[in-house]
Amino acid sequence: MLRVDEIVLREIRLALREAFEISSGSTRSRRILLLELRGADGASAWSECVAGGFPNYSPETVDTAWLAIREWLAPRVLGRRFDGPDEVAPVLARGIQGHRMARAAVEMGFWALAAELAGEPLARILGGTRGRVETGISIGIQPSPEALCRAAEEAIAAGYRKVKVKIRPGEDVEYVRAVREALGPKAPLAVDANAAYTPGEADLGAMRALDELDLMMIEQPMEAGDLLRHADLQARLATPLCLDESVDSPARAEDMIRLDAGRIVNIKPGRVGGFAASLAIHELCRERDVPVWCGGMLESGIGRAHNVALASLPGFLLPGDLSPSRRYWERDIVDPEWTMSADGQVTVPVDRPGLGVAVDAERIGSLAVRSESLSAGSQPG
Ligand code: OSB
Ligand code: MG
């Protein structure tokens, strides 16, 4: 039996060691919304909402998620008895459009709490089978092809199993060609456009040029809702398209497969509404032989723990964006911090219950710029 009596929301700000730029915007300091779920019997668990400070990747933000959790989501689950964490997502979804990142944060907190109460690692209760997961790096847009090549070479030297480079029109073919030449023909290289391209001739030309560079995938070239145009593009390219922003539910993953709008799925549990939806997408893709991998959203060590657990499932056949803590933060908010071996593997903490890392609640308290406690009975609406 699973019951949560209090959810504490906290916003912290963590400065990135270096600014991270994607086609739609740049982040220097990450606004992070953390949830602490307190169970009936003193047990507690943490989760992280992946929404950012600005609606460029998704319409959701830290502020919309805070509102959604306080007004509509927390009141549905506080004080309510669940037989298992898989029962939470449908309760959060009923009659609510969107707000998937907010829903995911609550739902994933319940999974972490269930693992804690069962004395099992989160990876185990999700169905994870691996003790180590391969990691790739995601490199933001750089000032020059030379700077990008340096970053890519350092990443390969550090052991990363996949190098993903952010692109946008004008900072694409020349940059990626330089990286391909620097790393050699066999290096595992991918690009991510974060929806910056259109179906027009100019952008198609860039896509055709990228198609010559033996990339593992081209991630999300066009707008999230544009499955048909992704299908048209996929028909013209040999390189598999990978969809990220477009796949916000198991149904959209099925659409992708049926339309051949992409051949790989980047699963981010935060984007799809949580673990139940992630498991459904994983299952569907396994049945259809579609490889999946676990994406990242510049998470702190808490969100990373959730992602690493998910990435240990058997269908996660490609390296995830699961960089170690040091890639992003001077100091993480978990102990031990996430690390990567010299051959690009992150260890799944299967010998410890719950998230498998200790959350530094004291530090979170001192970093918090706002907090709010929600409990059963004291709820609006
Ligand atoms: O598209 O995968 C993306 C970061 C913020 C928003 C969108 C994306 C990303 C990343 C970061 O690529 C990956 C990571 O956390 O390592
Ligand atoms: Mg992406």
Image (tube, rainbow, N blue to C red):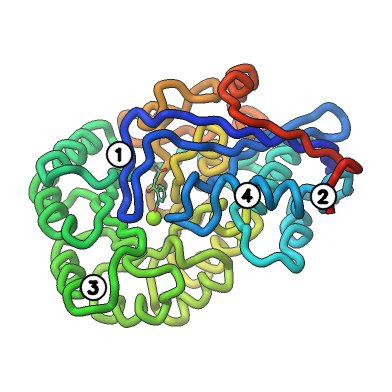
Identify the image quadrant of the N terminus: top right
Q: Which residue is mark 4?
A: 65
Q: Which residue is mark 3?
A: 238
Q: Which residue is mark 1?
A: 160
Please report whichever mark, 3 or 1, sits nearer to the chain's N-terminal start. 1
- Labels 3 & 4 near each other (Cβ < 8 A): no
* Residue 279 visible, this angle: no
Q: Is residue 80 left or right of residue 233?
A: right
* Callout 3 amino acid: Ala
Please report whichever mark, 3 or 2, sits nearer to the chain's N-terminal start. 2
Give the crowd class for mark 1: few <14, some 14-19, many >=20 residues within 10 Å. many
Please report whichever mark, 2 or 1, sits nearer to the chain's N-terminal start. 2
Image quarter for residue 144? top left
| Disc 3/disc 2 C-alpha distance (Å) | 48 Å
Identify the image quadrant of the C terminus: bottom right
The answer to whether 190 is drawn above or below residue 238 in the figure is above
Q: In terms of secondary structure, where does tag 1 sit?
A: loop
* Callout 1 amino acid: Tyr
Q: Please name the residue shown 55% across and 39% down the image.
A: 303
Front-most of residues 226 and 66: 66
Residue 12, given in percent of the width and then of the height, sits at 56, 30
Q: Is residue 325 left or right of residue 306?
A: left
- Labels 1 & 4 near each other (Cβ < 8 A): no
Q: Please name the residue shown 74% across and 38% down the image.
A: 113
